[in-house]
Amino acid sequence: EPEVTQTPSHQVTQMGQEVILRCVPISNHLYFYWYRQILGQKVEFLVSFYNNEISEKSEIFDDQFSVERPDGSNFTLKIRSTKLEDSAMYFCASSEFRSLGTARELFFGEGSRLTVL
Amino acid sequence: GIQVEQSPPDLILQEGANSTLRCNFSDSVNNLQWFHQNPWGQLINLFYIPSGTKQNGRLSATTVATERYSLLYISSSQTTDSGVYFCAGDRDDKIIFGKGTRLHILP
């Protein structure tokens, strides 16, 4: 069964360092997302990406964050200068169809746990 | 944006019991999903159910879109059912999660 894969599964970094989290969405999916979950809290939307551009982003997704689809398979989330409060599980997801009245089921990767010291 | 409320926040049951988890939305949603987050943190798709009723083994879900709620039923609970259950729905292009129901199944 096709699945979303994420790397690394766990990354420990020093405050102020740049981090890149990588995702390989399901191959025929067109819509990509990043979510984060601070330990013990709910899953929060960060950004959605379609047709090589951001389609929606939350207030969490400030200038320290960026997303990119550098090739036909990878989808990355970059945090330029990590802060302690960036420590969280980051989930990548993909879906086949665009919303607004059409069916869209999200499939999540297993997450990348980021620990900022 | 839409608000997603889940109840109860916590639930402790003996193995074999049945349970009903509820998800309310402040506005109509285009899509609705239920997820199970296992103790390892993985988000497992349970149901994609914007409306109607679906069943998968001991689990079933019903969404009444016109009344903006969805229910997840777990029958004959097993210890492996423990974890957090999230519902999520979307308007526009972002899917919003509820805070989850934390389920503990005791052996």
Image (cartoon, coloured by chain):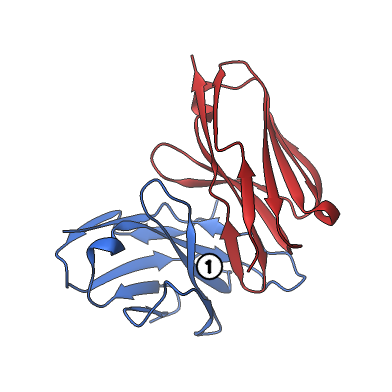
Chain colours: A blue, B red
B87, B38: nearer the viewer: B87
Callout 1: 10 Å neighbours few (<14), some, many (20+)? some
Side of B31 where A67 appears, left or right: left
B72, B68: nearer the viewer: B68
A95, B22: nearer the viewer: B22
Say above or below: A117 vs B74. Answer: below
Say which residue appears at 63% left-offset and 50% top-offset.
B5
Secondary structure type for disc 1: loop
Say which residue appears at 60% left-offset and 36% top-offset.
B8
**Residue A68 at what x, y percent from top left?**
40, 80
**Residue A117 at what x, y percent from top left?**
16, 59
B23, A3: nearer the viewer: B23
Say which residue appears at 36% left-offset and 72% top-offset.
A77
Say above or below: A51 vs B6. Answer: below
Say above or below: A80 vs A28. Answer: below
- The residue identified by callout 1 is A27
Side of B80 where B92 appears, left or right: right
Amino acid type at circle 1 is Ser
Side of A55 where A98 appears, left or right: right
Say which residue appears at 41% left-offset and 44% top-offset.
B41
**Residue A112 at what x, y percent from top left?**
34, 57
Question: Splitting the image into 4 quarters, where does residue B1 fall?
Answer: bottom right
Question: Splitting the image into 4 quarters, where does residue A36 fall?
Answer: bottom left
Question: Splitting the image into 4 quarters, where does residue A71 fall?
Answer: bottom left
